[in-house]
């Protein structure tokens, strides 16, 4: 079945450091790929998405490129801030005709220190 | 205005009780979902409804019964609560356009259920 593998956390960085969170997937067909973020005590928010190969999703300085050849969707940010501290989830969406569901990775907790 | 809302935010109850969690979306979406997040933060889909019709039921015990009175509401009723039901339950919705898996799902703030 479809699955998402995310790098294990937690990840601790200093402010202004470079961030990479690795994500690879296994899927039949052509899934859409997503990064969601969960701030402490809150629900999930969409961070960015890509719906086909070679698409790049970007938002708030974060980027990820849909790489079909390596089945990857790694999240990057050039300079993290304390406010980026959260849990990040990679997910794929599969299914059609109203049967779409998100399959999530296990989440990576990021802590950014001042 | 809150797009996807859930009540209650916290629910503490005894084993064996029956409880309900309510979800409402004001986005005009056709599809709604319930997800369970366990203590290790792992998220897994439980159910989805499209226009009040059950689409996905991911081998969830039949103690869990979703109900969709209209396409803006998807409630979750749980009978005979067990310790292992303790988790955060998230409701979500998406446009649900037929034939597309590109839709973004919008999540509610979650309901933290604690079974004692």
Image: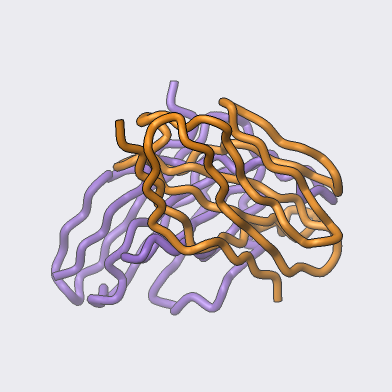
Chain colours: A orange, B purple
**Residue B87 against residue B61 in the figure, above or below:** above
Q: Nearer the viewer, residue B3 or B54?
A: B3
Q: Residue at x 62, y 31 (%)?
A: B28
- Locate residue A48, reporting x and y percent: 64, 37
Q: Residue at x 30, y 30 (%)?
A: A114
- Locate residue B49, reporting x and y percent: 61, 55
**Residue A5 against residue A78 in the figure, above or below:** below
Say if residue B17 shows up in the picture: yes
**Residue A89 against residue A26 in the figure, above or below:** above
- Locate residue A3, reporting x and y percent: 65, 69
Tally of numbered discs:
0
Q: Residue at x 66, y 42 (%)?
A: B30
Quarter assignment of residue A85:
top left
Quarter assignment of residue B54:
bottom right
- Locate residue A109, reporting x and y percent: 40, 52
Quarter assignment of residue B6:
top left
Q: Nearer the viewer, residue B68 or B23?
A: B23
In the rendered structure, the answer to whether residue A43 lies left or right of residue A71 reads left
Q: Quadrant of the image for the N terminus of chain A? A: bottom right
Q: Nearer the viewer, residue A103 or A114?
A: A114
In the rendered structure, the answer to whether residue B92 lies left or right of residue B97 reads left
Q: Residue at x 66, y 40 (%)?
A: B104
Say if residue B103 shows up in the picture: no
């Amino acid at each position: 079945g479809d699955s998402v593998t995310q790098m294990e956390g937690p990840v601790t960085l200093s402010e202004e450091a470079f961030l990479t969170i690795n994500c690879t997937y296994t899927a039949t067909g052509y899934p859409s790929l997503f990064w969601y973020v969960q701030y402490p005590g809150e629900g999930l928010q969409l961070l960015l998405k890509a719906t086909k190969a070679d698409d790049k999703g970007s938002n708030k300085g974060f980027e990820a490129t849909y790489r079909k050849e390596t089945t990857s969707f790694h999240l990057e940010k050039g300079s993290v801030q304390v406010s980026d501290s959260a849990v990040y989830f990679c997910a794929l969406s599969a299914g059609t005709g109203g049967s779409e569901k998100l399959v999530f990775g296990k989440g990576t907790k990021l802590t950014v220190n001042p | 205005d809150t797009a996807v809302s859930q009540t209650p935010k916290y629910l503490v109850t005894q084993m064996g009780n029956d409880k309900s969690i309510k979800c409402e979306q004001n986005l005009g979406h056709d599809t709604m979902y319930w997800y369970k997040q366990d203590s290790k933060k792992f998220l897994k889909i439980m159910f989805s409804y499209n226009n009040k019709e059950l689409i996905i039921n991911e081998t969830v015990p039949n103690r869990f019964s979703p109900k969709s009175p209209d396409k803006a509401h998807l409630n979750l009723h749980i009978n005979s609560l067990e310790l292992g039901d303790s988790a955060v339950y998230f409701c979500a919705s998406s446009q649900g356009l037929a034939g597309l898996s590109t839709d973004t799902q919008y999540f509610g703030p979650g309901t933290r259920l604690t079974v004692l």
